[in-house]
Amino acid sequence: MHRVKILEYALAALLRRPGKSAAILTAYTLLVTVLCSVLLLTHALKTEAEQLLAEGPELVVQQTLAGRHDLIPERTAATIAAIPGVASVTPRIWGYYYDSLTKANYTLLAADPAASPLELVAGRLPENEGECAVGMGVAAARRIGVNDDLILIDAANVGTIFTVTGVFKAESRLFTEDLVVVPGEALRRFFAIPAGMATDLAVRVHNPGEIETIAAKVKRQLPATRPITRNDLLRTYRAVFDWRGGMMLALFASALLAFCILAWDKATGLNAGERREIGILKAVGWDTGDVLMLKFWEGLALSLLAFLLGYTLAFAMVFHWGVPVLGDVLRGWSVIFPDLHPVPHVDLYQMATLAFLTIVPFVASTVIPAWRAATSDPDEVMRQ
Amino acid sequence: MTALIRLEDVSKTYHPRQADAVPALTGVSLAIAPGEALALRGPSGSGKTTLLSLIGCMARPTSGRVVVAGDEVSKFPEHFLTRIRRRTFGFVFQQYHLIPELSVQDNVMLPLYPEKMGLAEMNRRVGEALESVGLAALAKRRVTRLSGGEQQRTAIARALVNRPQVLIADEPTAHLDSRLSRELLERFAMLKRTGLTLVIASHDPLVCDDPLIDRVVGLRDGRLDGRA
């Protein structure tokens, strides 16, 4: 009852200072929005990478030559397939392609409908020589659609015409945006990959718990290879997005610091009126604890509201408004930036962390300045 | 009769041990009986307000003892002092010290928040207090829209809402004309008849010479003045 009454008084006190309350709320909401946007987007990108990788092979084996990635003989697949626990080994043909016309990198991939988790937004997958399906970014960059021609320069420096049979969609456009899928043999000729060679081998295993063991066995039996597990890829993606998110937060750190100083000095510090009010409350019998509870409720109400508003705004920005500004910085992979629309997802642990990071400092910066006034004799406070 | 409040050789210095230390009271001893109406008389800066603060447990003496209802409160921890202040004393400050953004009834309700009391009871007590000072009709009005006399009556209602044993008033007539001053003294006389102890600091002869006052104590330069 006592706490509820003081909460009521605190809320009324905030409403009695509408200008100041609104200014703090606006500034803090903006700050929380930026912070939450970066963290939500980083988290969403990592989650999507995880979801998409979950569809792919558990293990990819590359050939290395003097430490660089080289073509791998397809016969190596038989050696790997003989390792106990391996379910299948599939040679893959793919490669990066720099398009000087649009100054963008595309990823060219051999069509494999059985292994691909990718869906088409329109048309069909390529089946015949001279056909291809493209990601939305490629379609936009080259201004092409189904039944249009895509001309790419092959290994012999000759223009090759592919007719677009489909445009990709996926749960996320993170991986399909810069994709060009063509039939396997056509891609082999395009890149001049000799028969019996592949870009890498996709390995599926019966028991995911054995991936690391199988990777170790591959490395032992084929020392010139580099087995890359799905966890390795996940770690790389996490590191890349965490690094970008960290960079963004570092850039915002100065703004954050400036706000904190302002908040400490002006917004949440005690002005003469507030100091006097504390003196009056103490004089009429409020305990130090009551005064601190009042300030706690004031700080909590403002920062909780700012957090909820900021989180909602950030959520809308990241998951509905296409992440203006931040998206390009965080997700940038090739020159083609996908118009990313990550799948909406609420992570309660992340939300609790964000709430802790934004609410606790604000409440502390509200309560601590009041502490000195609240622990002084009321006579002293009112004389100041 | 046993004193309700007793000060023994009390001194108060503001900012002690600092270059700008200000001695406000020196060696004051005083006893106040229950139901007594005591006036503290002295010029500005004589230490009246400081003495009221010490009597009302709003400040602690730098030296000496303050005893309230048999307890030496000068050594009490802060939360005990708060409780004594809330249950024993009601204050009417010279500048009223109302919270300007609040209505009359919200200002009067302030001392009741820390009490274990429901909202209905709080409203009833506030209604009673406002009725006793003739302000029931202005309960919802913001205090900044009241006259000086009305603000003072609000301050008195706030001081009485917790049904204290002692009412402390600092220069209560300082901002009132003679008609309102007489009305105020009549109100104080009425409160005294209910058994309330009154401690009033004033240099206004109208107050100090009023028949309601049982005793006048003089203060000069922070010391009791025998000439009063």
Image (spheres, rainbow, N blue to C red):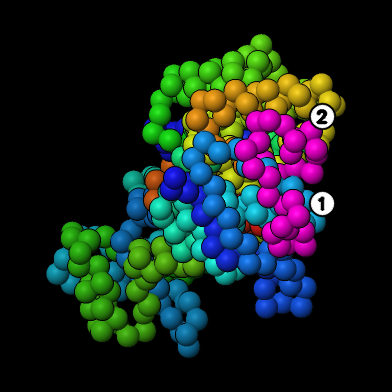
| Residue nearest the viewer, comparing A252 with B133 | B133
Q: Residue at x 64, y 43 (%)?
A: B215
Residue neighbourhood size for the residue with mark 1, other residues' Cα within 10 Å, grouped as few (<14), some (14–19), many (≥20): some
Give the residue at mark 1: B43
Q: Which element is circle 1 on?
A: loop
Q: Give the residue at x 77% y 51%.
A: B42
Q: Residue extending furthest top? A: B137
Q: Residue at x 48, y 88 (%)?
A: A66
Q: Residue A286: x, y in percent? A: 52, 44
The residue at 43%/81% (across/down) is A64
Relative to B186, say whether A259 is above or below: below
Residue B210 inside the magenta-drawn segment: yes
Between marks 2 and 1 in the image, the one whose residue lies nearer the viewer: 1
Quadrant housing residue B202: top right
Q: Mark 2 vs mark 1: same chain?
A: yes
Q: To which residue does mark 2 refer?
A: B176
- What crowding class fits label 2: few (fewer than 14 Cα within 10 Å), some (14-19), or many (20 or more)? some
In the picture, measured across the screen, residue B82 lies left or right of residue B116, that is: right
Q: Nearer the viewer, residue A13 or A19?
A: A13
Amino acid residing under circle 1: Pro
Please give the chain letter of the residue carrying mark 2. B
Give the residues drawn in magenta, as a range: B200-228
Q: CA distance from mark 2 to mark 1?
A: 18 Å
Which residue type does callout 2 highlight? Leu
Q: Chain of mark 1?
A: B
- Whole-percent x, y for residue A115 in the image: 35, 49
